[in-house]
């Protein structure tokens, strides 16, 4: 059974195609061994499924994920944690790693994601727009500004002309969404994909200003990836038509 626990992060590298390199290849050109993937928290559900598909396509391979906020993952990687692949929810965090450690190939944006207002099922507070989030007594959660969902939230709120003081700032999008699911807040700005995955407990309120704060998700293979062959194969698998269908079904947009 494949591991589902987080691991400490390492260096990342982006690739455009599935050309492998020596180190993780079995006899006959197959890919084997462990590939360690550091991925944005918002990719958890889709990458778990994509990882299982990858293992099925490459017997003898194991995908180990570390899911967290992209800024935290970049910090772990630049501190020297071992990783093969980094999939970030914003280009700037991949750029941090690229500057420090370099990548094995050219980084590629593989999906985009857009914000919605997550509310409890049935939208009991009748929230229809960002302006509604400023009502007296309404409790709102945001991601911390240093993580991609937080910076996107600030851009979207600025576009809507809304000044908002949240009751909590979360380390990643899963934390913000959990506050809604637990009833600790009335609303949170989260990615469309996360709200969709939380249905029917959570409903998503779309708002036009979020189109001005869409995040690009780049993926890369690290220059010093412990298993470069498997890393390149995994990135190629993420960018395949099969995986694109999984990502699109979850609500991600094509780049």
Image (cartoon, rainbow, N blue to C red):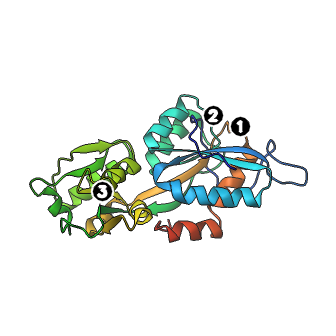
Residues at circles 2 and 1 in contact by the CB criterion of under 8 Å: yes
Kindly report the distance in space between the C-alpha atoms of the residues bearing marks 3 and 1. 36 Å
Relative to 57, say whether 32 is above or below. Answer: above
Q: How many marks?
A: 3
Relative to 169, say whether 53 is above or below. Answer: below
| 179 sits left or right of 165 in the view | right
Q: Residue furthest left?
A: 136
Residue 41: x %, y % from top left: 47, 49
Residue 172: x %, y % from top left: 39, 46
Observer-nearest residue: 53 or 163?
53
Task: Tell me which numbered mark, 2 or 1, is placed earlier along the sequence.
Answer: 2
Kindly report the distance in space between the C-alpha atoms of the residues bearing marks 3 and 2. 32 Å
Local packing at callout 3 (Cα closer than 10 Å; few below 14, some 14-19, many 20+) is: many
Report the disc number at residue 108: none
Residue 48: x %, y % from top left: 59, 55
Query: Circle 2 — which element?
Result: loop
Task: Tell me which numbered mark, 3 or 1, is placed earlier along the sequence.
Answer: 3
Query: Circle 1 — which element?
Result: loop
Task: Tell me which numbered mark, 3 or 2, is placed earlier along the sequence.
Answer: 2
* Residue 17 can be seen, yes or no: no
Residue sitting at 34 percent across and 56 percent down? 181
Residues at circles 3 and 2 in contact by the CB criterion of under 8 Å: no
Residue sitting at 30 percent across and 67 percent down? 121
Find disc 3 in the rendering and name its residue: 189
Observer-nearest residue: 60 or 215?
60
Relative to 59, say whether 97 is above or below. Answer: above
Find disc 2 in the rendering and name its residue: 82
Find disc 1 in the rendering and name its residue: 226
Local packing at callout 1 (Cα closer than 10 Å; few below 14, some 14-19, many 20+) is: many
């Amino acid at each position: 059974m494949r591991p589902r626990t987080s691991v400490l992060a390492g260096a990342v590298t982006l690739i455009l195609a599935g050309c492998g390199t020596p180190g993780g290849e079995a006899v006959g050109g197959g890919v084997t061994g462990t590939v360690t993937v550091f991925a944005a928290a918002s990719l958890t559900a889709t990458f778990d499924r994509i990882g299982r598909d990858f293992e099925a396509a490459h017997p003898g391979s194991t995908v180990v994920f570390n899911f967290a906020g992209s800024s935290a993952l970049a910090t772990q990687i630049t501190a020297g944690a071992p990783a093969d692949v980094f999939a970030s929810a914003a280009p700037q965090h991949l750029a941090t790693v690229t500057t420090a450690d370099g990548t094995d190939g050219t980084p590629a944006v593989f999906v985009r994601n857009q914000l919605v207002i997550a509310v409890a099922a049935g939208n009991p507070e009748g929230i229809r727009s960002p302006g509604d989030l400023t009502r007296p007594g309404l409790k709102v959660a945001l991601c911390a500004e240093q993580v991609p969902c937080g910076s996107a939230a600030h851009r979207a709120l600025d576009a809507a002309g809304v000044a908002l003081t949240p009751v909590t700032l979360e380390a990643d999008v899963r934390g913000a969404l959990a506050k809604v699911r637990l009833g600790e807040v009335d609303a949170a700005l989260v990615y469309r994909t996360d709200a969709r995955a939380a249905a029917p407990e959570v409903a998503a309120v779309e708002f036009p200003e979020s189109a001005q704060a869409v995040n690009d998700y780049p993926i890369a293979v690290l220059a010093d990836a412990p298993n470069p062959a498997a890393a390149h194969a995994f990135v190629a698998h993420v960018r395949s038509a099969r995986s694109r269908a999984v990502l699109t079904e979850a609500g991600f947009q094509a780049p």
